[in-house]
Image: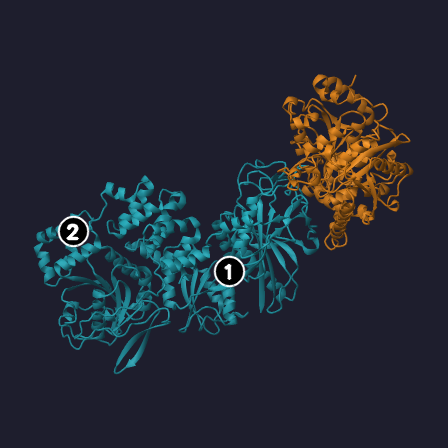
Chain colours: A orange, B cyan
């Protein structure tokens, strides 16, 4: 399959484009697709670094809140519908430097705010496994594009689970790296202290290479970290292949059942997964994350506070949607925002503005920051006992469009497993763990900061027990004869 | 009684190459929206990257302001919507600014004050919105320029202090090289907080004033606002806490928004920037950025180089000038002459050519060479000015120029002696006349030598050589009216007259040196109370001409007693640094003795005799000889006392601590031949001429200048029941400067009645009229101790320290001659 992907753009770009367009007409993964735009701009295959040769020539999708020069950067919002990015995000540039080619922009919940991609103002994306069900979100377009074989990998952004949750809904791998390891330059900010660029793929080699290429300090992002220079335990171990956990019996933390509140399908898969890891020689240890119940409220307090400032720049003055006429600059700003933002975005901006009001900060924003610290300490204590923590990615499988089987409030509460990693800044990986009733179930592994290699190693281990299935009808890449 | 409190928020744009969070050029005046990028335009997805240089400059300023430097400073987002703010939040600092708890010292009208600095924080500037008709245009070139905000505590009291503080700030940031301090272009900006309350009741309701685009507007706006708030309180009202805009066209502040509509900025820490942690290397860089500050440098210049405050003030104003000066001194130049050349001719030439000192062709080497040539007498003053112009015109060294132009003076005594010999041999009759006791031909002979040398003879040397060759010493006695030259008329009254014939009167005076040749010059026959500007112009120009010429070894001015204290101080301000002695003398009664009969000598004859001796042998500069005593030319007071049968007068010096009085009786008796003792004048305030302005030898020009200057001045003496509105009438008639003679240490009524100075002071402040305050008594005016004098200070009156009304008045006249504006006059007046 990889051989096909490595050559498709060079050998038959037109056929590939045609095939993707045909498939995507049903799924709606891409908001914009043009495989030839950057074909000549990515580094030539031969010149690419040997270490990451696996990526040379590969087409990839980019969530439409990550900047790719010459492509739109709509963020799934009316207010940026016609905005074209004048620059590349650092992560995109680095992938292009090793020969990968961005081919299009994928759909998302407006500004990354949502769990279904139904909050996009610009397109509908459906789950390749079952069109009645949502694809997850907010990086739903990227998950769908990978699951439907449109691209071998795609970039997403993860603020509270936006890479991992759609990955779990679509049955693909989704990695949320440690905060700061991947430059945020070019990622349209939703909640700056939580945002991180992640990747989705059905192939662990590709996923690992994408992570390694993207990560590293960036002069354009002062919160970025030089992972290589940290000399972490995992990095010293020399990468996933030789992590050595088998030798000393890696220890997996699991949560007490009363903290989980899972659907039957997810619960069944979770316990099966635990047994699977035991059978691979992993030690399993029950731990308690006492702060878990506060994750959702704390996440929504901090994320909306930061969002209220981050989204203030969209005022119709310099770019983006603006009314044809306004009496004065104030009215221009008011009308642009009224017409440009969707209801979920408005809700979160208002919430964020509310929690930051002077006189109320102690009650909301500052209290949330204190709890965030407690959550981080909770994880630190946990990682004192175990190497990784295993949780479900989401308490249930992909829900249906329209929220009939899961209300928006329930969707927010269900972010607790994923959002905890963002609040603590630690890496987390969704891996496919089974398919029940025609829909995939994903599990999440969490590791201490910079523990990406051990997450990938564990996923490789688990893949020896369960090889992820692709969505029915999409087993072969688009364009493959 | 009300008290006012002013705090300032000063913004300075840091002069970094690039903006604070991106690589765009930080520059003023470029094509709109030409220095922008996705980062400073707030495009989706971009992140700020902190400019380290901006941080360094910011810490340097905080350190200079004596702040506690934060080892960990945090940026925060300040949220508000305005179209010129690209992100609609400003990255600023709030909880953890980079500097806190500093201070800066200022001085206004002799009152020193320590202004506490609340905090110093760094932030990004916004763009500019321009409203044009029904459109609003935006220029984002300025967006993202590093902006340093300095917040003071409300420690200031009057607008003038704020103005002084801002001027000091401007100079400081220019010295540090972190900002050009240009308020007109907006690289330095200021908002002010003002509150007024009853004395002792603490701060009142705070009003913020914005749009203060120059230090002058700051002063005007603050003083306007203080009186506005006072008016409200006096009428029993309450000041509304609000933000007001200064309308510079109407000179009023206008309400902008009230507290209720104030922003909630919803600060929170900027997640895109990690806290800035200072490390040792960074702090070392900060220390390296510190420089000697203007105030410290001014003090050092005064102490180390013996400069006047005004000279030092001029030199330190620009760092480049101060450094040029010190480089010149290091090359061996005399600090005094370097300072006065820089402040006058060099400054004039630079202004004319629109150049700055560090970019002009005049370098310290050339300048030092010019001063050395002057000092060695190889060129004289007038030629030196031409040489300086030529340096600028032809980019050559002074030595090369005088060689090429043949401008070198003859300073070799042997060479000059040859010329003198030739002239003396050619004019035996003139020589004979001189030997016989006539002074007149000396001038003729000097003129002949000058002619023979094409004007290249060094004047001082020529005078010395001629004097010794002819064995004469020429003293010019200028008769300038007064009783000393007056006559007792038939009806017993004293009237003006011509000075008696000295040679006759002195015929038997063995105390006079034999080589003395006196020349009498009749400048005016009037009584000294009749002096007009035209008379002073004659006196000034005649003295100036004689200082330039070579024949007189000294000058005596015979004067009346009534106005001697004015003329003496006037001449001091003009000629205090002259190369020859200029001695004033007077007599309270005319020379009543019969002509020819030498004894008993009258007071008039005795005083002139003493003055002549002093002029023939004493130190150069201006002095006063009266009644066998020598006095400094400043702070004289004439007192008439009953002494025996004759009504006699006596002079006294006020405030001797600063202006020393006579050094004891002079040896004027006929038996004595000892040289009179001179007064040590080194403590006197510096003379102020020449700085610029008119050529003192040009009588017409001096007269015009004096008439204009004197028409703007007025002396007023405070008295009980004085009505301020009368002074307003004077101001309306063109009076711009008052010498205000107050009581004791500078007290006067400023009550809220018509019978006080308040209305006049306020009207004056609003119209740029200055009040220079002296005392009716022998006291130091410093506005200390009394409530009323503090009020006077608040209203802008300027204390004159120990100067008497007469000395302050003449200083004021001369100060105007070389000044461009009222501010400069004020500065000269305060430089004592």
Disc with the residue nearer the chain's start (2 vs 1): 1
Dot 2 falls on which chain? B
Of the pair B625 and A480, the residue shown nearer to us: A480
Vertical placement of B594 versus A269: above or below?
A: below
> Percent x, y for residue B732?
46, 60
Q: Is residue B178 left or right of residue A30?
A: left
- In the depicted structure, whether residue A210 falls above or below residue B290: above
The quadrant holding residue A246 is top right
Q: Mark 2 points at which residue?
A: B416
- Where does the image place residue A32, in percent across and percent down from the top left? 74, 27
Q: Which of B608 and B705 is in front in this view?
A: B608
Instruction: Specify the label residue B105 is tagged with.
Output: 1
Q: Can residue B381 be seen in this view?
A: no
Apparent side of residue B478 relative to residue B661 in the rendered image (left or right): left
Please state the horizontal and vertical placement of residue B317, each as a whole percent of the image.
Answer: 44, 52
Does B498 sit left or right of B771 as displayed?
left
């Amino acid at each position: 399959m990889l051989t096909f992907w490595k050559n498709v753009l060079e050998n038959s770009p037109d056929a590939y484009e045609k095939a993707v367009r045909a498939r995507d007409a049903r799924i709606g993964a891409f908001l914009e697709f043009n495989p030839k735009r950057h074909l000549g701009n990515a580094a030539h295959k031969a010149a690419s670094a040997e270490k990451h040769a696996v990526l040379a020539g590969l087409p990839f999708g980019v969530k439409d809140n990550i900047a790719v020069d010459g492509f739109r950067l709509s963020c799934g919002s009316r207010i940026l519908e016609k905005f074209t990015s004048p620059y590349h995000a650092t992560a995109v540039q680095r992938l292009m430097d090793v020969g990968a080619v961005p081919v299009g922009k994928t759909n998302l919940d407006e500004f990354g705010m949502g769990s279904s991609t139904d909050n996009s103002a610009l397109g509908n994306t459906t789950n390749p496994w079952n069109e009645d069900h949502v694809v997850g979100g907010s990086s739903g377009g990227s998950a769908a594009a990978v699951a439907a074989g449109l691209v071998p990998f795609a970039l997403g952004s993860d603020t509270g689970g936006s890479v991992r949750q759609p990955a779990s809904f679509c049955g693909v791998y989704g990695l949320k790296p440690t905060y700061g390891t991947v430059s945020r330059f070019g990622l349209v900010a939703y909640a700056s202290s939580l945002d991180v660029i992640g990747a989705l793929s059905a192939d662990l080699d590709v996923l690992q290479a994408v992570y390694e290429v993207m990560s590293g300090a960036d002069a354009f992002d002062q919160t970025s970290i030089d992972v290589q220079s940290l000399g972490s335990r995992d990095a010293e171990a020399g990468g996933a292949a030789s992590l050595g956990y088998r030798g000393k019996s890696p220890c997996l933390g699991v949560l007490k059942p009363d903290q989980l509140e899972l659907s039957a399908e997810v619960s069944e898969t979770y316990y099966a997964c635990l047994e699977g890891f035991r059978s691979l020689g992993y030690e399993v240890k029950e731990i308690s994350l006492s702060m878990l119940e506060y994750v959702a409220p704390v996440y929504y307090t901090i994320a909306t506070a930061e969002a209220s400032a981050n989204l203030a720049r969209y005022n119709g003055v310099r770019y983006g949607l603006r009314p044809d006429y306004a009496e004065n600059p104030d009215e221009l700003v008011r009308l642009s925002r009224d017409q440009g933002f969707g209801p979920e975005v408005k809700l979160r901006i208002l919430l964020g503005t509310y929690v930051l009001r002077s006189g109320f900060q102690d009650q909301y924003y500052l209290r949330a920051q204190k709890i965030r610290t407690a959550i981080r300490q909770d994880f630190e204590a946990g990682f004192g006992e175990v190497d990784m923590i295993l949780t479900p990615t989401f308490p249930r499988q992909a829900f249906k469009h329209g929220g009939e089987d899961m209300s928006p409030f329930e969707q927010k509460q269900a972010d607790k497993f994923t959002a905890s990693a963002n609040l603590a800044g630690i890496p987390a990986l969704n891996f496919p763990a089974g398919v029940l009733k025609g829909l995939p179930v994903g599990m999440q592994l969490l590791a201490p900061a910079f523990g990406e290699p051990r997450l990938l190693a564990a996923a490789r281990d688990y893949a020896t027990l369960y090889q992820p299935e692709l969505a029915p009808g999409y087993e072969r890449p688009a364009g493959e004869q | 009684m009300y008290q006012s409190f002013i705090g300032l928020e000063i913004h300075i744009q840091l002069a970094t190459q690039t903006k604070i969070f991106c690589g765009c050029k930080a520059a003023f005046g470029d094509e709109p929206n030409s220095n922008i990028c996705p980062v400073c335009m707030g495009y989706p997805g971009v992140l700020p990257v902190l400019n380290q240089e901006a941080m360094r400059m910011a810490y340097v300023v905080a350190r200079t302001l004596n702040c506690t430097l934060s080892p960990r400073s945090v940026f925060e987002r300040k949220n508000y919507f305005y179209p010129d703010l690209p992100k609609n939040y400003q990255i600023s600092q709030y909880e953890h600014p980079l500097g806190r708890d500093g201070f800066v010292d200022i001085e206004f009208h002799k009152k020193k004050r320590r202004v506490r600095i609340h905090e110093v924080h760094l932030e990004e500037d916004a763009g500019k919105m321009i409203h044009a008709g029904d459109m609003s245009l935006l220029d984002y070139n300025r967006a993202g320029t590093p902006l340093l905000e300095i917040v003071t505590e409300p420690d200031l009291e009057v607008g003038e202090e704020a103005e002084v503080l801002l001027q000091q700030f401007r100079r400081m940031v220019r010295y540090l090289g972190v900002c050009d301090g240009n308020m007109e272009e907006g690289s330095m900006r200021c908002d002010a907080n003002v509150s007024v309350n009853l004395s002792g009741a603490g701060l009142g309701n705070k009003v913020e004033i914005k749009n203060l685009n120059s230090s002058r507007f700051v002063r005007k706006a603050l003083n306007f606002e203080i009186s506005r708030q006072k008016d409200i309180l006096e009428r029993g009202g309450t000041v509304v806490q609000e933000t007001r805009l200064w309308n510079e066209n109407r000179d009023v502040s206008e309400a902008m928004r009230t507290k209720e509509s104030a922003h909630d900025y919803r600060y929170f820490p900027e997640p895109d920037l990690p806290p800035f942690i200072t490390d040792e290397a960074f702090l070392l860089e900060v220390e390296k950025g510190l420089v000697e500050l203007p105030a410290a440098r001014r003090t050092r210049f005064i102490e180390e180089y013996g400069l006047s405050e005004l000279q030092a003030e001029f030199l330190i104003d620009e760092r480049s000038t101060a450094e040029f000066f010190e480089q010149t001194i290091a090359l061996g130049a005399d600090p005094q002459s370097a300072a006065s050349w820089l402040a006058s001719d060099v400054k004039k030439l630079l202004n004319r050519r629109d150049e700055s000192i560090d970019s002009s062709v005049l370098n310290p080497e050339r300048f030092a060479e010019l001063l050395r040539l002057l000092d060695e007498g190889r060129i004289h003053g007038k030629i030196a000015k031409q040489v300086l112009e030529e340096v600028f015109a032809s980019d050559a060294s002074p030595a090369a120029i005088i060689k090429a132009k043949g401008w070198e003076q003859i300073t070799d005594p042997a060479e000059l002696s040859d010329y003198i010999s030739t002239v003396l041999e050619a004019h035996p009759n003139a020589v004979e006349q001189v030997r016989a006791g006539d002074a007149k031909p000396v001038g003729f002979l000097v003129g002949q030598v000058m002619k023979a040398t094409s004007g290249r003879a060094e004047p001082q040397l020529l005078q010395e050589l001629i004097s010794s060759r002819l064995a004469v010493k020429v003293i010019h006695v200028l008769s300038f009216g007064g009783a000393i030259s007056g006559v007792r008329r038939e009806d017993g009254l004293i009237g003006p007259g011509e000075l008696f014939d000295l040679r006759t009167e002195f015929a038997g005076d063995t105390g006079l040196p034999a080589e003395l040749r006196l020349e009498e010059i009749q400048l005016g026959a009037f009584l000294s109370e009749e002096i007009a500007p035209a008379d002073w112009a004659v006196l000034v120009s005649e003295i100036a001409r004689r200082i330039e010429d070579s024949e007189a070894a000294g000058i005596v001015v015979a004067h009346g007693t009534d106005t001697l204290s004015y003329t003496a101080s006037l001449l001091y301000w003009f000629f205090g640094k002259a190369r020859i002695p200029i001695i004033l003398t007077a007599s309270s009664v005319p020379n009543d003795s019969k002509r020819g009969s030498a004894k008993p000598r009258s007071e008039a004859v005795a005083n002139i005799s003493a003055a002549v001796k002093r002029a023939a042998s004493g130190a150069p500069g201006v002095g006063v000889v009266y009644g066998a005593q020598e006095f400094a030319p400043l702070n004289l007071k004439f007192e008439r006392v009953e002494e025996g049968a004759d009504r006699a007068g006596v002079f006294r010096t006020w405030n001797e601590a600063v202006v020393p009085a006579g050094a004891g009786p002079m040896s004027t008796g006929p038996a004595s031949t000892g040289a009179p003792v001179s007064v040590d004048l080194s403590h006197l305030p510096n003379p102020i001429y020449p700085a610029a302005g008119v050529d003192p030898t040009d009588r017409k020009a001096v007269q015009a200048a004096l008439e204009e200057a004197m028409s703007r001045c007025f002396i007023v003496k405070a008295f009980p029941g004085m009505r301020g509105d009368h002074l307003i009438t004077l101001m309306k008639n063109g009076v711009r400067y008052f010498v205000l003679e107050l009581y004791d240490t500078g007290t006067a009524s400023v009550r809220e009645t018509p019978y006080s100075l308040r209305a006049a002071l306020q009207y004056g402040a609003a119209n740029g009229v200055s009040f220079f305050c002296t005392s009716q008594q022998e006291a130091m005016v410093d506005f200390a101790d009394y409530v009323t004098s503090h009020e006077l200070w608040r209203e802008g009156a300027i204390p004159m320290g120990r100067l008497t009304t007469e000395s302050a008045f003449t200083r004021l006249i001369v100060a105007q001659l070389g000044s461009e504006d009222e501010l400069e006059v004020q500065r000269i007046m305060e430089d004592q």
